[in-house]
Amino acid sequence: MNQWVKDREKIWIGIRRDLHQIPEPGFEEFKTQRYLLNVLAGLPQERMEIRTWRTGILVKITGTGAEPRRKFGYRADMDGLPIEEETGYEFRSTHKGYMHACGHDLHMTIGLGIVTYFAQSEHSISDDLIVIFQPAEEGPGGALPMLESAELADWMPDQIVALHVAPEYPVGTIATRPGILFANTSELFIDLVGTGGHAAYPHKANDMVVAACQLVGQLQTVVARNIDPLDSAVITVGKIDGGTKQNIIAERARLEGTIRTLSAESMTKIKSRIENLVSGIETGFECRAEIDYGANYRQVYNEAELTREFMGWLEQREDVTLFECTEAMTGEDFGYFLAEIPGFMFWLGVDTPYGLHHAKLEPKEEAISLAVSTVADYLTWKSGQPV
Ligand SMILES: CC(=O)N[C@@H](CCC[C@H](N)C(=O)O)C(=O)O
C-alpha cells in the first residue's frame, strides 16, 4: 500500500466519522458540503480550483504536464438515507431518522483522500484531475443535472472512475467486470383513491387497503411470469401507506417501490404490465389510480477496454485481491456519467454482516486507505500512459 496514504489512516477515519454523523437527504447536503469545503480549504491551494454546484462540489487539480492534458475524474456521492441508525457507533448519526447506510460517507472520504494526495507538490500528476462530489444519488438523482451543468461543462473528464462499498467482500477485495455492473432502475409510486367509511359498513365504502394488498400480490407475478428467466429483473415494494385509523376504511393507499432490469426492453415490458394490472385494479375496485415512475437511472456499464486494463493493473498489487463479479441489481446514477464518459465503477470490500441500506451497516474503515492508495496509484500510473 502507498505509505503516504497509510501513514494518514487516522485522518481519513476521522473524516469518515465526522461525515457519518451528518447524513442528509438528496439536494439537502448543506452541512456535508460545508464540511467538505472546510477540509478542502485546509489543503495546499497552488494547483487546486473549487466550484460548487447546488449542494455538490467540483475540485480540479491542475496537472503538471504540458498542454493539452487529459482530465481524469473520480466521482463520490454525498446523500444519506431515511433510516434510523442501529449501529453501536459512538459517532452515530446526529440527524434523527437519517443514516449513511450506503457508504457515501466512505466514498466522500476517499474522494477527499485523493484530492489531499494530489494537492501535495511531491505527488504531481501530469494530467488534470477532477474530483466530483455529487448530491442526491439515492434520489432524485444528481448525476444527470450535474452532467448538464455549466460548472462541469469545461471540466468534463475524459475518463472517470467511481467505487461503491461492498459489505460482502473482505477488506482488500476489489470486484468489478467489463460491461454491465449495475441494473437499469425506475422508481415506482402508485396512488389509489377509493371511498372511505366506517369499518363496520364495508358495503358503503371502497377499501384501498384491500386494493393495495391485491396489487402488491399481483405485482409479484410480473417478473415471475412475464420476464425471460435468463434476463434478470426485480420489482420491490418497499413502502405501503394507507388509511388513518384501525376502525376507518381507507380512502387512500400509496405503494412506493422500485423496478430493476438488466435490459432496457424488460424495463419497458414491466412498466406496460404494471399499467395493465393497475388498470385492472381500477376496474375491479372501482377506484382511481395514478402511477408515477419518479427517477429512472441508466445501467452502470463499464467500458470494456479500460476495465480490463484496470483489472490487469490490479493483478500486480499485493494489497488487493481482484474478483471478477457478476452484475448486481443495485442502481446508481453514475450510469449517466458512464453513458457520456469512458470509465468504470468497482466494488470495494468493507466486510460487514449487514447489507447496504441496513440500519446496522458498519463498513470496516481500513478499506478507506486501501481505496485512496489504489485509486491514487492507478491515476498516477494511468497519467503516465500514452493517450
Ligand atoms: C447502490 C444503491 O443502493 N443505489 C440505490 C439507487 C436508488 C435508485 C432509485 N432511488 C430507486 O430506488 O430506484 C439502489 O437502491 O440501488
Image (cartoon, helix red, strand yellow):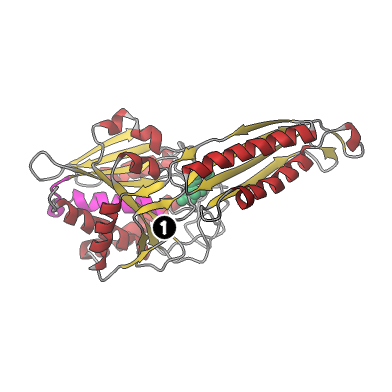
Give the x, y percent position of residue 367: 36, 63
Q: 345 or 232, which is in the foreground?
A: 232
Cβ of disc 1 within 8 Å of ligand 1?
no
Question: Mark 1 Cα within 10 Å, few/some/many (few <14, many 20+)?
Answer: many
Is 119 colored magenta in this rendering? yes
Report the amino acid beneath label 1. Answer: Val
Boundaries of the magenta span: 106-127
Q: 280 or 45, which is in the foreground?
A: 280
Is 63 colored magenta in this rendering? no
Q: Element type at marker 1?
A: strand
As drawn, which residue projects farthest toward the bottom?
Answer: 318
Drawn side of residue 41 relative to residue 53, left or right: left
Residue bearing the label numbered 1: 165
Q: Which residue is located at x 41 percent, y 69 percent?
A: 170
Q: Is residue 55 visible?
A: no
Drawn side of residue 140 relative to residue 163, left or right: right
Q: 376 or 54, which is in the foreground?
A: 376
Q: Which residue is located at x 33 percent, y 46 percent?
A: 75
